[in-house]
Amino acid sequence: MIEDIKIVMHQGKQFIPDVTAAKVPGIFRGRPVISQADVDEQALVELCPTGAIRSNPFSLDLGKCTFCGECAFANPEKVKFTSDYKLATNERENLIIKAGEDKPMGLNPDKIRKEIHEYFGGSLKLRQISAAGDNSCELELNACGNVNFDMGRFGIEFVASPRHADGIVITGPISENMAQPTQICYDAVPDPKIIILAGTDAISGGILAGSKALNRTFLDKYPIDLYVPGNPVHPLTFINGVLELIKSRR
Amino acid sequence: METVVIKNNQNIPLASIPVSDYEKFLLVNTSFVKESSFHCVSYYGVAVPEKLRLICCMADDDHGTIHVSSSLVDRQATLPSFTAHHLSFEKFEREIHENFGIAYPDHPWLKPVRFPFNRANHQSTIAHYPFFNSASEELHEVGVGPIHAGVIEPGHFRFICNGEQIMHMEIQLGFQHRGIESLFLEKKKLLQRATLAETIAGDTAVGHTTAFVNLWESLCNYTPDEDLQFARTLALELERIAMHTADLSALCTDVAYQLGSAVYGRLRTPIINYMQIWCGNRLSKGLIRPGKLNFPFTRDLGDQLSRLLDVYEKDFNEVSDNTFRLPSVLSRFEKTGVVTHGQITEIGAVGMAARMSNVRRDVRATHPHDLYAKLEHVPILKHHGDVYSRAQIRREEINQSIGYIRSLLRDIPGESKNRKPLGLPKANAFCISLTEGWRGEICHCAITDEHGEFVHYKIKDPSHHNWLALGLSVRNNEISDFPVCNKSFNLSYCGHDL
């Protein structure tokens, strides 16, 4: 017991006091900024492993980006990744960063269903579905609940049963073999419910896009409430995105 | 000669792999495993015009060599199985059966492996897996998954129990199948393939990507500069520390030791945050690349890591000293989920799952790659094969890795100033690459065509063999001990399903 108390004392406070203003250490690759510099755009289009970069006009799609940073190494003048981790949005098009843009990303309040704040503003229970996720996003979603990020302080938690959940969080590109379990799980969540796509693989298939082993038809059936880019998603990206989704807008 | 003998990360002309008739092929390879120093690192089929070429790679741990042999068989052949001679081939032959329709009448357990999109029999679907059934009125069955209670990957566990006691557990996998091996052929850009390697198992991004880049560089006859090898070795050991710490946290969670769960959980944070400081990604994605290093390891990074490890080690040892002497923890760890030395040898388990039962299987020692030959790695072995042994291995391997990192940091190679460019991969070649990831042995094999393009890519994650070890470990245990057994192995679903 005394040993336990000593450990508690030595550990001190580990939580991040303000998750909306925390600084991430190191060279985290977050929201990119693309300059108007006149460069060989085609070379960057060719370089990108997932076709996230388009030219004419030049843009970078965070729903496809693996955040490998190779484009920024190849042409630092054109593409720069900032450490801004607030990448979540509720409109697919908003994930496409255009040349010359340097403004915070965010949610379009008009597209947020009214009942989301009303029902979930104080408590949001989520059922996570790893649909062929590679366990990197899953590790980071688990980290959201650890003593550092402590998402539970906002009443946001992952729960075991879809019956207890207010929505689902999908990671992974959704394999054919997970298509039916994903549907069954979603159907088991009581209405009203939300869908969050976490990570590049879930949003677009990422590097796995085009594989014959995938079946992404589930995503064509329902509106998506939140897109959280990342490879994997950073816990701060996820927590801030969800807080934005459920906050009061009065 | 029926086999060609090569080293880890050596490429050879495809034509130099001997082709024997099947009876001889079977005899040679099943004779190898009678010696404890041999085990099968990969065995698979490659479709060739009108035939199927079976390629078997047997590692000789005493000599640090790999014996590669092959046989040509008919596409729909009916063959006597290797498995009837040694159980460690069972998953490989199930895979060959599933992918190509080869029949093995004397295989004891010829069930689907992962229901791949390109399987031979499309009548076989994941919703209709043929579970073993007790047909007893006294026993009951418990089905768990594919979606589990926690935030983890999907898979289905089917228990047959007598009251609280587990008699048998069958593991159905395949939900995670993404067709990765096919994508290695379809995606032609090198960066795409490195990115694919990172996602084979996202918790082992360094391990699998190191296997891929070592293989690719070998095919290109490219010797990586010391700073590249340094970065790979260092990153592998940091990944090991991070994941072992996370596993110790999960083990504490499952025996309701909240303080251990919280402290180990948070101790992983500085390690993965350090990876973000070094390469911008907490799970090390983007760090390992063939023929280059986007994130040079500087002296300043070395100093930061030294300081970080000093702090980490103090906290880690404090919480470990306490955890590993708490009666409430020990009573749940000790003699729980035992897999014997004999069973481990029989099923060909690798990595921690082998070392916990005194099977000395560790690529770092037996087939060293990158800077491991310099580190003169001595594997940590345990003898009891229980949850406690698996927990102890993690604790001791973390301390060992810290030691290795400190010794690496004493001699940080400078960034190579005139990095050689990568050439093109050899034509009509075969290459095998073994890497010791934190879970265990990772094996990648590739074959190129006359233009040097991949025509076949084969991946074997350590989980391939080790899932069966989990199945064996829970027998005669209480079903309530399943979670702690499961966490003590912490196997990869996507690494298995590919």
Image (cartoon, coloured by chain):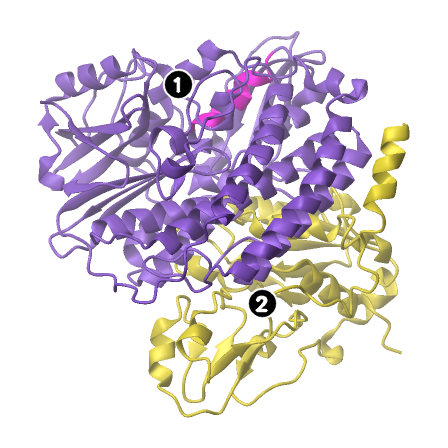
The residue that appears at 86% across and 61% down in the rendered structure is A119
Q: Residue A66 at what x, y percent from top left? A: 49, 64
Secondary element type, mark 2: loop
- The quarter of the image holding the C terminus of chain B is top left
On residue B109, the disc is: 1
Residue for point 20% across, 55% down:
B425
> Does B456 lie within the magenta span?
no
Chain in yellow, by letter, is A
Dominant secondary structure of the magenta stretch? helix
Relative vertical location of residue B416 with respect to residue B129 in this rendering, above or below: below
**Which label is found at residue B332?**
none
User: The chain shown in purple is which?
Assistant: B
Q: Give the residue number, with chain letter if any, for mark 2.
A: A27
Residue at (38% x, 50% y) in the render? B229
Other-residue count near label 2 (Cα within 10 Å), few / some / many at <14 / 14–19 / ≥20 = some
Residue A63 horizontal/vertical position (percent): 54, 69
Q: Quadrant of residue A244?
A: bottom right
- Drawn side of residue A85 relative to residue A71, left or right: right
Instruction: Point out the stretch of residues depicted in magenta.
Output: B465-475
**Disc 1 and disc 2: Cα gap in Å?**
50 Å
